[in-house]
Image (spheres, coloured by chain):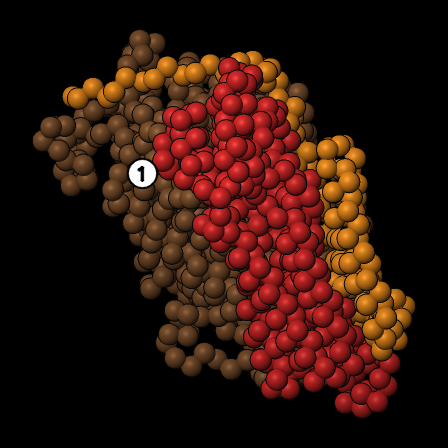
Amino acid sequence: MAPADAPTHPAAPTHPGDRAHGHPAADASPAPATPGKVAMWLFLATEIMFFTGLIGSYIVCRGGSPPTAYSNLYPPTTPLDRLGDSKGVVLGAPGADPARAAEAIAAATGKGEAAIARVLAAAPHGVVNGLTEEGATKLAEGLNRLGAKAEVVSLKTSSWPRPYDPATNPLSIDLTTVNTFILICSSATMVLAVSAIQRGRKAKCSLYLLATVVLGGVFLGVQVFEYHELLEGRIYPPGISPTGHFRPGVSLFASCFFTVTGFHGLHVAAGVVTLLLVFLASLTGRFSSRNFAAVEYAGLYWHFVDVVWILLFTIVYLV
Amino acid sequence: MSAGPNATEPNPHDHIPAAASNFLTRYVFSTDHKVIGVQFLFSSLFFFAVGGLMAMVIRWQLAWPWKPVPILSQWLWSSPGLGGQMPPEFYNKLFTMHATIMIFFVIIPLLTGAFGNFLIPLMIGARDMAFPKLNMFSYWIMWPGFVLITLSFFVEGGAAEAGWTSYPPLATAARSTPGSLNGQTYWLLALLCAGISSLTGSINYITTIVMLRSPGMKMFRMPMTVWALFITALLQAFALPVLTSALLMQTLDRLAGTNFFTPVGGAVANAPAAVGGGAPLLWQHLFWFYSHPAVYIMILPGMGIASDVISTFSRKPLFGYKPMVIAMGAIAGLGFIVWGHHMFQSGMNPALGATFMLSTMMIALPSAIKVFNWIGTMWGGRIQYTSAMLNAMAFVSMFIIGGLSGIFMAATPVDIHIHDTYFIVGHIHYVLFGGSTFAVFAGIYYWFPKLFGRMMSERLGLIHFFLTFLFFNGTFFFMHIVGWHGHMRRIADPTVYEFLRTPGVVGMNQFMTICAFGLGASQLIFAWNFFYSLVAGPVAGPNPWKANSLEWATASPPPYYNFETLPRVYHPPYEFSVPGGEDDFLPQTTPLPDNITLDPVMA
Amino acid sequence: MTETAEPTLPVAPPTPAMAEAAAQAEAHAPYLKVLFGLMVLTILEYGYARFFKDATGPLVFGLVLMAAVKASLVGWYFMHLKFERLWVFLVLLPACLLALILTALLFPDFVMRQEPLDEPVRQAPRAPAPATA
């Protein structure tokens, strides 16, 4: 076993001056494979298989979802074979007097107070479902007379929540695109940190590491905000969730979404903690152009987390 | 190797670390691979006894259904209302936990944890694993698993009882069985811990084998045991994460209400219907994607051990060393694409059934290569019938029976008849007990002198072997027959069926049970031999078996740094009875005589 | 077969690619260029998803293609796969291959299901209340 402070990256041939250490030449060339690096790549291979289990399940769950699993009017997996002709009213805005809008909805549907409160809270995408064509037209007209914004919609089904469809999909693509930018930037600062320490620029390396930690933290913060909005902060129409909240149990999509992004988030959190420790270690000046394994390995892990996010962003949010 | 510290010029990069200073770091939280291996050995052997006792109770119930078990019934499930009868759900817990413990807490930790840890650095000539602390972690993360799996018997509803495969909805719906109330969650968490242990262990093994071989130890000079452990570690590294993800999904299904394995509106026992949308079959696919490679994880190290033992005690070079390695690699590679043969009766797409049948049949080819090579090694050798050798020979012969019965299950039409019967129980025990466990015994008898510096009693070893072999076949062979007759597995009382009440079936069940008790009792001889030899066995020299591989080139037990100077290796470890030599063995550290050339293909 | 050669140390001389990397390490240009490419691709994905949101085929094809390009860019340049030796690919390729095999073999059971899915779902009869024993 080599002592812990042995150089992990013996001098590269571009620095002939470093050769004067008396090491035999065969050992002084850069070691392309150190045990740490082999283990890191093996670990990443196991991580690939781990995410294969999750993402592969997501893909087949999505691909195998029956064409009527999700609809703009009814909660996921509601049997729709006798509801094909039913109409709904989308409430764009409850108008100046929400109480009267609520009364009108109650009169038209006989729904309970809590259900109607959810419809109002979900505006501009509130949905009143279970109406006949006649009832829907009447309710929409009544609501529009009260100053509310309402329109009649018919049942539209899909096998999976469609992106940009507020009736079935609660995810904000705009927010997540920004978040993707942030994570990609953090990957770039990470590689710049490695490149800086390879050239012996310790201060620059620490700075880039700090930037990576901050960007990673911002990504996590945005994700926590997103989770809070989904779980608690907002009320969603019935096509997303029967309870108004988007929680892991409300649909297979929700289960997949929270599991896949949740485990990715845990990986990001682990990466941020690791990078924070590496950053603090870099402040002590222990990394140099010949000893930067910790920075390099943390970087590999961080880029891997970024790659997984690139795939998740596409598969979960955009497709 | 009794060279003084300055006898040879030490390599300036080769550095002997300081010895652990206190008791705690030397024997408990040790980073020494040998201590960790012994820790794995003892904890696995303890759970081996626990799992074995469960099997005894299972057999009692099958032979004499509902008769109170002596002693146990009083303090395990005694209830005045039941008159000392075993509750059927307790029977379910027993077979579930017997399999879980034997697979995840006995065989895998014994083969990869105990033998892997102890042997890999010694056999490749390294001072320790590449990451000693990670190695320590891989042992101590087992402990939450040990605790959780034991604790699960004492939570409300008791231990898991959905079978070791934990198929949903039995495992996911909380009200489906008492064990699904809480015990299943403990089961899942225990398996996660065992999985993390295996995963960190396998990364460590691969890195060690790739990076830390001693000078001259080319890949094709490594003993078969190391090759087997290397390929096993690869299997674990690539297959286990998928099980981890599946375990996490099932945990979330149980705790967070996700819908991965619940069909639309799925409900059990008047529970409120779930939203669902997932598929129980998804669990089976993900589970078997790991658990089929896992059966190779449980047999490949046994194959490696048997190869080394057989070659040593036949005093002959291993017949076809390189083909053996390639066959092992082929078994491992094919092992990844055959998992569906566990699911022929699950409602899987029939198109997949044919694919999986074909790939499964192909595994017979490399397996047969190995069997022929073992026989070829013994052929014409001067066989020494030591305990280790007899166990290794039992491994080969029982593996043949287990492998042949496996072909029955691999053929979809036959599988329709024997699926979920005692035929499969017989098959798995011929492979796991007849295969892996005999290999474990062979390994323990063979390396005990190296582990503890003392010899085990050969006489007791022979008695133990013959009794075990006899009772093993008495216990498990008839399972094929009752299984073919339709005796289903996982049933507490077969006599509820007319066709299983016939004297033949009942008699065979009772015969198997008596043999099982004999099998259990025979292990007491082993335990006595093990512990007695530990303190009072005759002192073993460094190389009592006159074997070639590197672990025999250092003291028994080896010092914490393994080798004074890292040994230089000149040839594979199977050069026995080299013509013209004085001894009938040639250690790897001794150059081959000039007149000897090794066959480039076979050796 | 006597051993006279030097022991096979796990240390190998640098490949030409590595020497080139060392020379290039001075300049940030490649990393910033890659970052720019990734940004552009992300915006492209965003626009593409918006444009094709109702056409599933082109949507999936185009987006997965772009995601694959992005992932490869990160792997190739940021994770320095460009400079790595064969062994890294020997670790990565089996994992990727197995990932594909697992996902592909899940398709027949979940995506290409055999039972007619448009069959009306029968409401399960309500189970009677549990009898009190």
Question: Which chain does orange denote in the image?
Answer: C
| Residue A5 in the image: above or below residue A157 | below
The reply, left or right, for residue B8 in relation to residue A31 is left
Q: Quadrant of residue C17?
A: bottom right
Check the picture and name the quadrant holding the N terminus of chain C.
bottom right
Q: Residue at x 55, y 23 (%)?
A: A137
Q: Position of residue A204 (x, y in %)?
A: 72, 82
Circle 1 sits on which residue?
Answer: B181
**Going 52% across and 32% down the picture, which residue do you hit?**
A145
Which shade is chain A? Answer: red
Q: Is residue B420 left or right of residue A273?
A: left
- Work out whether residue C7 can be spotted: no
Q: Dot 1 lies on which element?
A: loop
Residue that appears at 80% across and 50% down:
C44
* Residue B159 in the image: above or below residue B151: above
Q: Is residue A22 above or below residue A135?
A: below
Rendered colour, chain B: brown
Which chain does the residue under circle 1 lie in? Answer: B
Depth check: give the residue in front, A40 or B57.
Answer: A40
In depth, the one of C61 and C90 nearer the eye is: C61
Please provide percent x and percent y for residue B35.
Answer: 45, 66
Is disc 1 surrounded by few (<14), some (14 to 19) or many (20+) residues within 10 Å?
Answer: many
Q: Residue at x 70, y 84 (%)?
A: A202
Residue A280 lies left or right of residue B51; in this view the side is: right
Q: Is residue C45 above or below residue A138?
A: below
Q: Where on the picture, by quarter, is residue B205?
A: bottom right
Percent of width and height locating residue B303: 58, 44
Q: Position of residue B94 (x, y in %)?
A: 31, 36
